[in-house]
Image (cartoon, rainbow, N blue to C red):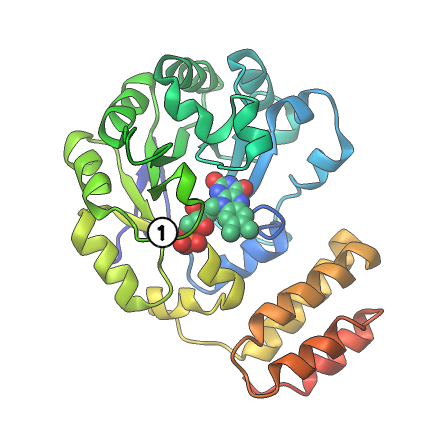
Amino acid sequence: MQLKKINIGKLHTENNIFLAPLAGYTNCVFRSMCFSLGAGLTFTEMVSAKGLCYDSKNTKELLQLPPEYAGLNAVQLFGSDPYFMRKAAESDELSGYDIIDINMGCPVPKIFKNGEGSALLQDIPLASRIVGEVAKCGKPVTVKFRTGVDKNHLVTRDFALAMQDAGASLITIHGRTRDKIYSGPVDFDQIASAKAAVSIPVIANGGVFSVADADGLMDKTGADGIAVARAAMYDPFIFCALSGTPVPDKKAVIKKQIGDTFSLFGERFATVYMRKMLAFYIKGMPGASAIKMKLFRCADRGEIEEILNGLNF
Ligand SMILES: Cc1cc2nc3c(=O)[nH]c(=O)nc-3n(C[C@H](O)[C@H](O)[C@H](O)COP(=O)(O)O)c2cc1C
């Protein structure tokens, strides 16, 4: 895959391979790890603009910044009220973030019914107002969206143009409709039609699980870069393969992830989270199901590290 920096407003990313937002997973430690493995830009998981404005403790925990330099910091907000979206973007909690990304692709019924996430694909004027209002915060605004709510309502090109006109500095397009959630083929043509129409960078997303997938997505869409989501949960070292970064000692990297997660997020969260992550990392290994059973009985950091020590990567 052809590597290049991406300009987002006046900012430049390290390269054009991004870690897409993953609710429940892309915390600051994971983002930092993926950056060190070759991701050019990473995003927080989606954070509620209203939750932020109403001072929710849970929301603020999602906004911790990486423990060490991890490139530009991009936060993803969701919401449908332009006023709250701008207020959140301008809040002190986001002062350490360089880029504000707006979620216009989340398919989850609770979000959709609230008129948020992918529901905004059905209301281009409102989506544009949100971008215009958030852009007033002075930071570059990016938008992540899908191709439409279903195959009878494809909006990719029009939506891309509207976001650009409203002031977005980059768009990420997940090449699936809302009703497909995360399954089915990625619609390369839809992404290509948006890429041909706009002058801001376009990042293609969906279905990258190998270097060949990444090359295919780039070739078939003409996009400027790609965003990887699920593959990174199972194998964050995919960023090494995609970016040409030498593969480090995998156990040492995961051990650091465990250490940083425990020190930043506390015992309870870290135990559950790292059990889950290790269960992803061992997928496909011989004896994975027995190891998984043992993992889910781990009660503390020591027990998790003991399992890690016995693994063969
Ligand atoms: C568990 C999970 C959580 C996700 N959370 C978010 C999110 O917070 N914001 C977002 O824009 N997309 C979210 N997504 C969508 C991904 O960013 C991505 O668009 C989608 O998974 C397709 O990419 P992939 O085929 O590389 O996984 C999530 C996906 C999964 C599987």
User: Does residue 72 appear in this view?
Assistant: no
What secondary structure is marked by label 1?
A: loop
Name which quarter of the figure residue 45 lies in.
top right
- Which quarter of the figure is the C terminus placed in? bottom right
Whether residue 97 is visible here, answered yes or no, is yes
Above or below, 77 relative to 202: above
Q: How many marks?
A: 1
Q: Name, please, the residue furthest toward the front.
A: 152
Residue drawn at the location 42% of the way across and 39% of the way down: 179
Crowd tier of the residue under label 1, counting other residues whose Cα lies within 10 Å: few below 14, some 14–19, many 20 or above: many
Q: Left of 14 or right of it: where is 215? A: left
Whole-percent x and y of residue 89?
Answer: 55, 23
User: Which residue is located at x 20 percent, y 37 percent?
Assistant: 195
Circle 1 residue: 206
Q: Residue at x 69, y 34 (%)?
A: 59
Return the residue nearer the eye: 309 or 23: 23
Query: 133 and 119: which one is in front?
Result: 119
Q: Position of residue 260 (x, y in %)?
A: 70, 61
The response on whether ligand 1 sits within 8 Å of label 1 is: yes
Q: In this rendering, is residue 266 above or below 128? A: below
Q: Quadrant of the N terminus?
A: bottom left
82 and 61: which is toward the camera: 82
Q: Amino acid at mark 1?
A: Gly
- Residue at x-position 32% and y-position 51%: 226
